Image (tube, rainbow, N blue to C red):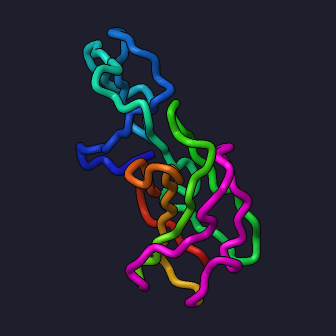
Amino acid sequence: FTSNDGIYYWSIPSSLSQSSYYKIKICDYSDSSVCDESDQFTINNEGESSSSITVTFPNGSESLSDTQNYYITWNALSLIGNYVAISYFSYEDGYYTAIDSYELNDGSYLWNPLSSLDNGIFNWYKIKICDYYDLSVCDESDDWFTIY
C-alpha cells in the first residue's frame, strides 16, 4: 500500500537473480481489477558491490513500545565480516548512538528500545548497521519509526 502520487522509490533486493524477465504491476488498492503492467526489464548484477547490508526491521513507519523486545534484522551480502556495528539515530538528538558496536553478523539482534535510549523517548528514529571491519559499508532504516 502506497499513496497514489505517481512515485515509489524501490530498492531492488539483493536476493533477486539476474534476469531479463521482470515486470512491475500496479493496481488500484480499492479495485484490484484496475491495473497496469510494465514492459519487461532487466536486473543485472554488473557493477554491484560484493559487500552490502540492508536493514529490514525496523525499516520505517513502525511504532514500537519501549517496554517490549524486538528483533532488529538485516540482510548482508557476501563479503561482510563476521561482526556488525548497530546504532540508532534520534531526530531530536541529531546524532548516532551505539546499541552494540560488536555484534555477530547473524541477521538479527534482540533489542529493547528502553535499554538503549539515554535521553528519553522521542518520536523519530532510524537504525543503522555497518560492517564492523569496513564502516563505509552501511545501511539505515529507509524511513523514521517511532517509539512510545
Q: Is residue 71 left or right of residue 33?
A: right
What percent of the width, then of the height, locates residue 137?
41, 48
Residue at 49% from the left image edge and 54% from the top image edge: 130
Q: Give the quarter of the figure containing the C terminus.
A: bottom right
Which residue lies at the image location 36% right of the left edge and 32% below the top edge? 49
Question: Residue 84, position in %: x, y?
Answer: 57, 53
Residue at the location (33% across, 18% down)?
A: 44
Query: Residue 84 or 76: which is nearer the viewer?
Result: 84
Q: Is residue 108 magenta?
A: yes
Judge whether 19 appears above or below 57 on screen.
Answer: above
Q: Is residue 20 left or right of residue 119?
A: left
Residue 113: which quarter of the image? Answer: bottom right
Q: Which residues are magenta?
A: 93-119
Q: Is residue 19 one of those drawn in magenta?
A: no
Most extreme residue toward the top is 20
Q: Position of residue 5 (x, y in %)?
A: 25, 49
Q: Is residue 13 above or below residue 30?
A: above
Task: Pinpoint residue 72: horizontal percent, then vertical percent.
Answer: 64, 56
Residue pictured at 71% horizontal, 61% vertical:
70
